[in-house]
Image: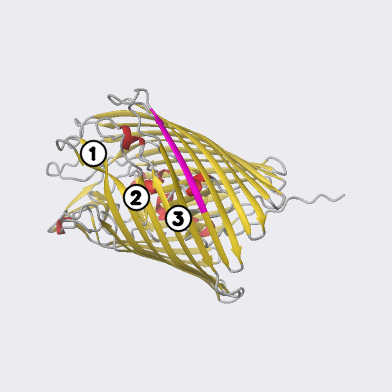
Amino acid sequence: MQHIDSVVVVGTFRPEKVIPAQVLSGERLQRLNAHSVADAIRYFSGVQIKDYGGIGGLKTINVRGMGTQHVGVFYDGIQLGNAQNGQIDLGKYSLDNMAAVTLYNGQKSSGVQSARDYASASAVYLRTRIPEFREGRRCNLKLTLKGGSFGTVNPSVLYEQRLGERISNSLNAEFLYTTGRYRFSYVKADGYDTTAVRQNGDVRALRIEEGLFGRIPDGNWRVKAYFYNSERGYPGAFVREEPGRFRHEDRQWDSNFFLQGSFFKAFGDRYRLSVHGKYACDYLHYLSDPRLDVTTMYVDNHYLQQEAYLSAAHEFALFKWWDVNLATDLQYNTLDADLVNFVYPSRLTSLTALATTFRFGRVTVQGSLLHTFVEDFARERGAEAGVKNVFTPTLVVQYRPFRSVDLALRAFCKRIFRMPTLNDLYYTFIGNKYLKPEYTTQYNLGAAYTKEWPGARFRRFEASLDAYCNEVDDKIIAMPTSNQFQWTMVNLGHVGIRGADAVVSGSMRFGRLGVDCRATYTWQRARDLTDRTSAYYGGQIPYIPWHSGSAVVGLSFGGWMLDYSFIYTGERYESSANIPENHALAWYTSDLSLSKRFHLRRSQLRASVEVNNLLNQQYEVVQCYPMPGTNVKLIISWIL
């Protein structure tokens, strides 16, 4: 009897073309000049990252102008939740253990999937690394040390152990410290007149992930525990108070923990089952003291969110040309806070999705119907919002006109909504329990083309172009009440969005020289159509540029790698009032990195140097939140 060891097949992940999707994975993802997930997502078309400055600043994502709360963020297939305000800070999620980052417009469409996968206007999927072992090895060890400008020190360790033929373990830990101090120019209407140092941007953060991975016949399972703890200063808006004095002393403490698991198994060719479960606990402490910063009011609040989630999805292959997916999710959220007159809300959410896929030769048709039931509870009777019971459909069509050419024409229409957050409904003196959901209707028409030439100098070419139209109804906005000191949340807004996304990428090989290129472009017109009597009716909504894009060029020769990346954000307005005082100029940044691999006896050493904002651009992503100028990072990785 001869024993044959397990074989691991490694390939490049490419999402299906039925729904517009962009992906950064593997070596391409690791070679980007990016510290966090937010930095990597900047290279996708149709995306705006709101960055409040430096490593410690809040970073949220806006896709196709619909707002942060319309984007679902999934970590290893399970959504990251924030029932309190609906925002996920992507700056907290490192690329150190990330295998792929994927952006789907509309929704993911891959057969058996949870009901949550259908419940967002757009979705970002973060897929962490699964242990892989070379022949004869039972463990992997990777030690990384990053350091550079702003007093940044960022060590990390990744340890993977094969526990058996079908079970493996992964432990990843990372610590980050930075002072967050950097020089910048303060700009006024008559030009740059002041040079200052950004203060109170320090960060101390610890992240630990423990994963257990298993394989079963025709399936797999995984369990992951995640812990994140940080203390950071929020620099705040840069507004002149006294000549030469700029003080911002807001502090925030975060402790995030979740335990999640997933199980997948195929029962023959006709039925597949996927089960997900999760428990999460998020603690936040925010302190703002006017004795230290006269521009703020005193705030010393503590928040505790808890979430329990369970999902079961079934896929039935009725015929070779017809699949049906049925998924049911249950989620329960609670929020505690030490606010005055707080109602201590909790929320029960039930999602049921029925989806089907038809394949008729070169035509693929997908349809889904999502039912959402939401009921809120509060300690005080009558304080909770009404029950929400909503059906939302999606229709997707793809046509491949040629058998021998990889060209796909695609279109989709999706109706979806986002529930008001617990802050929208119940925040003391501001929340409004009578809010309606914010509805979005999306239309997309596009094409994707791929061509490969194995063994030729020009190896691969990919291109996609999508035109879209989004309508956002009952947009939730803050409005003053009887005076300017008390505001409340109301349904008043309507936004009409028209745009186009283009992505082109290719790879070439000239002997030992490899070249990889990728470029994106977005045109977007997002107008505020709320009030026809307003002087600003039809104006571009804040922070949405008409033109934006990015480009990445990577060269590899032997063990050397040289990468250049460029990001451009065009002119935009910083307020719904499209007047000259709110006009923001275009900005762009160039980043450059050089790395070298050294092969030792039984290990590998990789050294990299990165220069970010090479041309020392002085710019702001968000008004009064200046970004860093030229900065340097050194990285050393030792793989055993």
Q: Tell me the magenta residue range.
A: 368-377
Taking the magenta stretch, the answer to whether it contains residue 266 is no
Q: Earlier in the sequence, mark 3 or mark 2?
A: 2
Q: Residue 361 versus residue 202: which sits nearer the camera?
A: 361
* Residue drawn where x is 44% and y is 63% of the image: 563
Q: Earlier in the sequence, mark 3 or mark 1?
A: 3
Q: Secondary structure at mark 1?
A: loop
Q: Amino acid at mark 3?
A: Gly
> Residue 205: which quarter of the image?
top left
373 in the magenta segment: yes
Q: Is residue 119 above or below residue 505?
A: above
| 19 or 598, nearer to the observer | 19
**3 vs 1, front mark:** 3
Q: Is 561 left or right of 344, judged from the image as shown?
A: right
Furthest residue in direction top, as rendered? 380
Q: Residue at x 22, y 49 (%)?
A: 624
Q: Amino acid at mark 1?
A: His
Q: Which residue is mark 2?
A: 67
**Disc 1/disc 2 C-alpha distance (Å):** 27 Å
* Magenta-drawn stretch, dominant element (helix, strand or loop): strand
Q: Residue at x 56, y 63 (%)?
A: 364
1 or 2: tag closer to the N-terminus:
2
Residue 23 visible to an observer of this rendering: no
Name the residue furthest right: 1
Specify few, some or many for label 1: CA neighbours under 10 Å numbering under 14, 14-19, or 20 or more: many
In percent of width and height, residue 163 lies at: 68, 40
For residue 248, the mark is 1
Mark identifier at residue 608: none
Check disc 2 and give the amino acid type.
Gly
